[in-house]
Amino acid sequence: MDYIYLDHAATSPVHPDVVEAMVPYLTEHFGNPSSIHHFGRKTRQLLDEARLVAAQSIGATPNSIVFTSGGTEADNAALFGTALAKKETGRHIITSQIEHHAVLHACARLESEGFEVTYLPVDETGRISLSELKAALRPDTIIVSIMYGNNEVGTLQDIAAIGELLEAHQAVFHTDAVQAYGVLPIDVNELKVDLLSVSSHKINGPKGVGFLYIREEVALDPLLYGGEQERKRRAGTENVAAIAGFKQAISIMREEGMEKAARYEAYKQKMLSIFTEAGITFLRNGEQEHTLPHVLNVSFPGVKTEILLVNLDLARIAASSGSACTAGSLEPSHVLTAMFGKQNRTKEAVRFSFGLHNTMEEIEQAAQETAKIVKRLQK
Amino acid sequence: MIYFDNSATTKPYKDVLDAFVTVSQAYFANPSSIHSKGGESERLLQQARKTVSQLLHVKPQEIIFTSGGTEGNNTAIKGVAMQYATRGKHLITSAVEHASSFETFHALETLGFDVTYLPVDEEGRISVDELKAAIREDTILVSLISVNNETGTIGPIEEVGKLLQEYKKIYFHVDHVQGIGKVPLSFTKAGVDLCTISGHKVHGLKGTGILYKRESVLLSPLLTGGEQEGSVRAGTENVAGIVSLAKALRMTFEYMDAGVRNMEKITSYMRDELEKLPSVVINTPKTQCAPHILNFSVEDVKPEVLIHALDQKEIYVSTRSACASKQTGASRVLLAMGMKEKRASSAIRLSLSYENTMEEAEIVLRELKKAVTELQEIMR
């Protein structure tokens, strides 16, 4: 049996067309975009095109796109950049307890530098409460950073409503859309977000590249200082080939449209129905309606996460405990802890995430295999 | 086509490219994932780290993979400053650093740090005595470029390192982006605590780089989040980029001896020929300079115009650092060397790779002479 990869939220395979789009920029068009000769102009042109494609994918202007080395850098740049730029107008930050660590650790650092951070709690479905957010807002709040779709459980936040709420407030609104981008339509103006983070390797693009959308009137201090690339907002020779690959990945994503969302939803339902039919006990973690279509998080009572994952791996199925960034850690996930406190299900959760190349046949196979293993372990 | 702009960026080696494509397609999993696909990626990452550490004669855990030279310099400088700010807030650097160091120091000044920018002599070199005199009780960092990216001047890194051995509380960072593969630097001998290297200057890919960090040095991370790279650099590792970087570095070291000899021959020949031209003045020092860079000024000729004229002949050179190419006017580095505005704003930089040939140099010289004569006639 071939390996069944159900860990697309950790990283996704590079689309064959993406690699193909990169190769010319690693061979004949290898110039530095800042160079004023032919080689520079050739790669500068690619950057302009890619910026336009990225901008169009979220209804933004090209000038508002800053290419980064990935999602972590985009999140860090958004938080540190805003905090530094706005520290004279306030030092209060609002985020949630279930953010990715690229946001949470940045917030922790800012706390050590004299900023005050409110970590909004979530309910059992992983959603924050708008009224709690409203209550937490203060005149000196400078950033609200709330992720669009959670990477571990898939729960979506009501970004449009938060954008609406913040419209009249000075706070800059950042959303980490790393997981939502590619599976949900995103328009920064409809959502009224000021900053939005995206990563390439989650949408079948190469690793080492991403972008941060920065609404044109929003000023940010840069995270990387040096050359004048990215309109002085991100120094460093542009990663041209990776950006070419990212551009291709975005184009493919847009061509395919959101049809895949329905397919992933069907995968999800298939897995759940196979679990039910098999008669194993399971608890679904996360919102059922407002959720990322490609993420399914399930707890199997009586089966520890690590044990299940090892058994799944032996059965040639790649799944994960939640965030890959904390996969090595023995602590239960901060997301599940925020949702369920100390309940056992936080230590019995597995995330299946779907993507390119997955077929219904594979999903059925994986679900049946999972059910078999769980049945054995639940005894 | 003749590409003499290898200090701006280099063409990736074929094998480097192949490694990148193979890893991208066959080993795409996240190295942090605990399933066996993640394990495969993790092993590739470890192998690359081991290769690089052996090439640089350091420990694997002292290698931090970054997104490039700019991130390396920012991380080292800001990382030490923030980590050790309680010990002192004085930092020492020079007036001829790359923008990614220079601008980071400027940013640190706004955060309350005190920065000494050492002046340089007419060859672009700092004085070790002046550095010694600048050291204070509260100095925590000395950061210097080993090979200047505009002029190729080699700085007194070993002497500085030796001096700093007496100051246990001062960390020493070296920007070795232009030096790697061209000018040998022993981290141990030079007492280097932190060293920045970029992939795309050694026929690796853009978006890849290495920061060497001595094990005992702590850094406040620039990128925070996941626990990758010993928690010093968060973010999913660019596995394919990293593997290809290890390959590029290994190939570079393999070809280095012959390559350096070849470049020395070419630059020295070009220097001799260019010196014969009455309107040309060479800005790269004659001794203690890197083998791959030759910087000169053609008075009365706008460098951009000359570059475009050469561009027509499919010869590619540059004015200065590509990162500063949008700035017009005099080069900050050349001004710091005491040159007049006119000379400092009419510089051309030729930068070679191991593969460039004497035949190419002949053509470049011929076309340069032609272009200079024509342009000077127009200007007259």
Image (cartoon, rainbow, N blue to C red):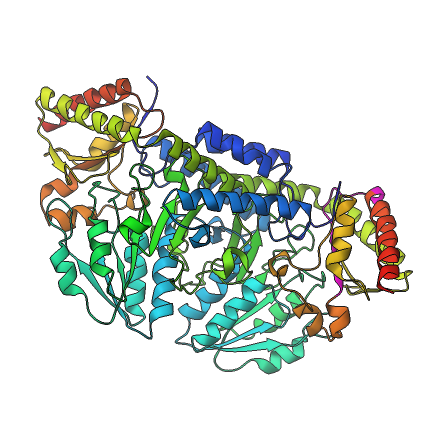
Q: Position of residue B23 (x, y in %)?
A: 48, 33
At horizontal 21% and vertical 55% (from top left) the residue drawn is A162
Q: Position of residue A16 (x, y in %)?
A: 47, 28
At horizontal 49% and vertical 43% (from top left) the residue drawn is A50
Image quarter (top left, top right, bottom left or bottom right) of the N terminus of chain A? top left
In the rendered view, tell whether residue A75 sits above or below residue A152.
below
At horizontal 47% and vertical 35% (from top left) the residue drawn is A248
Q: Is residue B136 visible?
A: yes
Q: Position of residue B106 (x, y in %)?
A: 51, 72
Quadrant hosting residue B178: bottom right
In the rendered view, tell whether residue B183 sits above or below residue B138.
above
In the image, which residues are magenta? B346-359
Image quarter (top left, top right, bottom left or bottom right) of the C terminus of chain A? top left
Q: Is residue B289 visible?
A: no
The magenta stretch spans residue B353: yes
Front-most of B123 and B232?
Answer: B123
The magenta stretch spans residue A298: no
| Count of numbered marks | 0
Q: Position of residue B79 (x, y in %)?
A: 44, 64
Q: Is residue A346 left or right of residue B341?
A: left
Front-most of A309 and B315?
Answer: B315
